[in-house]
Image: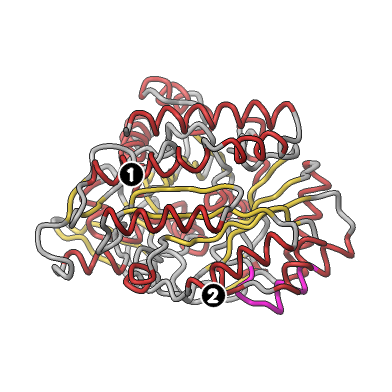
Amino acid sequence: MDLLLINPYSSNPYPMIPLGLASLAAVARAAGYSVQVVDAWAEGLSSQAAFEKRLAGLAAPKVVGVTVLTPNLAGAKEAAIAAKKIFTNALLVIGGAHVSAVLEEALREFSEADLGVYGEGEETIKAILASFLVSGERPQKLAGTIWRNSDQIIKATPRETIKDLDILPRPARDLFNLDLYQPHPPYGRRKTYFNEITSRGCPFKCSYCAKSVFGNSYRALSPVRVVEDIKDLVAKYQVREIHFYDDDLTLNRNRAVEIMELLIAAKLDLIWSCTTRCDLVDVELLKLMKQAGCWMISFGVESGSDVLRETVNKGVTRKQIEQAFYDTKRAKIKTTAYFMIGLPGETEETVKETIEFADKLDPHYVNWAVLTVYPNSPFYFDLQNGKYGKGKIKKADSASSPFQDSFQLGFEENLTRERMETLASFATRSFYLRPKRIVRILFDLRSLGHLFRTIRASWSLLRWSMAKT
């Protein structure tokens, strides 16, 4: 076996197909290499013994790749240790958002790793395989990699981003046990449900966002390729619901319109949801989205305070937010609003203002979380440089949402981390535990499976929120 790709274990009860690894697998396979994957998260390999037993049953790979995300460093570390123990002769490569964010530090954190990959990994993994499988020696100086040279850690030149995403093969979903992936409510109204990504990069400059992998340059699959991919999912897997995990599906309005028109013309028995910004929708586009099968849009509101939104460079006004929610509901599309607690300058009063704003917007669903400061985000550098006062950085010791394993950094200014978590749990309960919203959720149920998933998620959310009281 040439390549083994590993997705580490997570305690989140709703595993998603790791499309990044699926893309790497597809590219390697298209280049003629044999590939296998282990998704410890989806397979429930929660103990080190279970994970090692799973690896021991595989054909020995020549190269092992482990994806590393900041919120799940512990799981990634355990995966790397196990992989090196079982496959002693394999080249162990780490990649993912965390590696791209901290670079040299990642190799210090993961002493087991022989090589790190930063930025987009498709072309880099092909170069690594081509080099190592021929020479048997650790590749060095390959663009987009970091490696050790005695006591030094060296960073090679960055690899150029892929300009034309249409050249990439479809993600290799067939390598994964698709029965293991369950959507978390409110998704999963229909079976079968898949997640999809059709673009990379975001030109906006929100201070909490780290763009270590895909950068600021927006690149996207062509509308024809998007719809052809969706048709393929429907034909192969009987997909009837999709969620687009693009940062901003409607960033390019002309592209969005063409996708909608092609979906309408295709007459697929399909519903879908997406995420975008409040300043990237309008009445006509929303009507077209609804006609094309859109049932829900998630918007990042972040705060009800104009001052706090300006602090994080959100670039969206209260009027634009209110108009987007009004227009979306008029188009008969449901809404989700994302809010953060713990932005610079946050106080009890601004949290109250945000709770009141959430009630005014009246979205169908909300998500409240405590701010996490990710490495390589503008916030991270601001805090390191003392912009919001020295000594404010604090590594948190409990989860900031009920579906999160761990997290990196937060900071305390006017509120302690513990108080922020209490306010987030209160805001969640005060929104959902109102009779009209309970009734609305009940009337929105579409199947027994949808009901059971909603009950499960509601119980998890309630336990988390009560624990933070």
Taking the spot 67% from the left edge, 29% from the top edge, the residue there is 451
The foreground one among 460 and 5 is: 460
Taking the spot 9% from the left edge, 63% from the top edge, the residue there is 390
Which residue sits furthest left?
A: 390
Indicate whether residue 166 is drawn in magenta.
no
Q: Image check: 56 left or right of 140? A: right
Quick one: label 1, few (<14), some, or many (20+) residues within 10 Å?
many
Taking the spot 75% from the left edge, 39% from the top edge, the residue there is 190
Q: Which residues are magenta?
A: 250-260
Which residue sits furthest bottom?
A: 254
Residue 452 percent location from the top left of the image: 64, 26
Residues at marks 1 and 2, CA–CA distance in whole angstroms: 35 Å
- Disc 1 residue type (three-letter): Leu
Comes first in the chain, label 1 or label 2: 2
Compared to residue 466, the image places residue 415 above or below, namely: below
Residue 116 percent location from the top left of the image: 34, 55
Residue 321 percent location from the top left of the image: 54, 68
Quick one: label 2, few (<14), some, or many (20+) residues within 10 Å?
some
Find residue 146 and report its image quarter.
bottom left
Magenta stretch: dominant secondary structure: helix
- Disc 2 residue type (three-letter): Tyr
Mark nearer the viewer, 1 or 2: 1
Find residue 282 and report its image quarter.
bottom right
The foreground one among 255 and 153 is: 255
Residue that numbered label 2 is attached to: 218
Indicate whether residue 253 is drawn in magenta.
yes
Q: Quadrant of the C terminus?
A: top left
Q: Secondary structure at mark 2?
A: loop
Taking the spot 43% from the left edge, 48% from the top edge, the residue there is 368
Find residue 253 and report its image quarter.
bottom right
Residue 423's tag is 1
Compared to residue 332, the image places residue 308 above or below, namely: below
